[in-house]
Amino acid sequence: MNVLFERFPENVRVDGRDYRIVTDFREWIKLQMLLENTERFTPWMVEMLLEWYIDVPPRNLKGAIEALCGFLSAEELYGEEAKAEGFGTAGVSKEVFSFEQDATCIYCAFRSVYQIDLETVPYLHWWKFLLLFGGLPADTEIQERIYYRGVDLNQIKSKEERKRVKEIKKRIALKRREKRKMDDYQIGAMF
């Protein structure tokens, strides 16, 4: 997708048919947090996920959920290369930031850099939010956190600098969560 001349999508495709979905960034952050805090898909979880469809959701529940997860990770926006390299939301590795734990830093960065108040902005497309998030300058606190969380201590030659960075990493570390991939949810087994 070329954001310079193509409109951001308002739907997903399942079994050759387009289905309108909610696209506001707030709802997709909620979805990501829901998935991060979910051990497995249950009937209740599936019912909740289908609420992201505006109209009647697809009958193919597995396809419906996979389409939502594709939209969530913005595969079409970032392309297969980023997906293959382990990049996800906002074009960066998912292990270096958390919408839950870094909410304040993200809010402040948007407010400072773009003059966007994420609390009061009436609407912001999920993919537009991701592009803006990924484009935040390196001197914002969230980008600094992303940098320090992702830096490889073994690449730092100076013992003092390695110690300093290690302390920073410890101070801003994300709460440990078991990494899950879409396959871990065993969607197919449910349907």
Image (cartoon, rainbow, N blue to C red):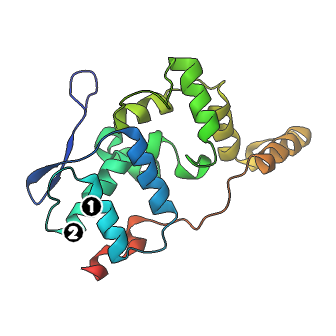
Residue pictured at 68% horizontal, 31% vertical: 141
Q: Examine the rendered structure and indicate whether residue 118 appears above or below residue 41.
A: above
**Residue 122 versus residue 150: which sits nearer the camera?**
122
Q: Earlier in the sequence, mark 1 or mark 2?
A: 1
x, y percent for residue 94: 53, 50
Q: Specify few, some or many for label 2: CA neighbours under 10 Å numbering under 14, 14-19, or 20 or more.
A: some
How far apart are the alpha carbons under marks 1 and 2? 8 Å
**Residue 44 versus residue 64: which sits nearer the camera?**
44
Q: Disc 1 residue type? A: Leu
Q: Taking 171 as reference, is 73 left or right?
A: left
Secondary structure beneath dot 1 equals: helix
Residue 63, disc: none
Q: Disc 2 residue type? A: Leu
Residue pictured at 27% horizontal, 21% vertical: 4
Residue pictured at 49% horizontal, 22% vertical: 116
x, y percent for residue 81: 37, 45
Looking at the rendering, which quadrant does residue 108 occupy?
A: top right
Secondary structure beneath dot 2 equals: helix
In this orientation, does residue 23 appear? yes
In this orientation, does residue 88 appear? no
Please give the residue where the numbered disc 1 appears in the rendered image: 50
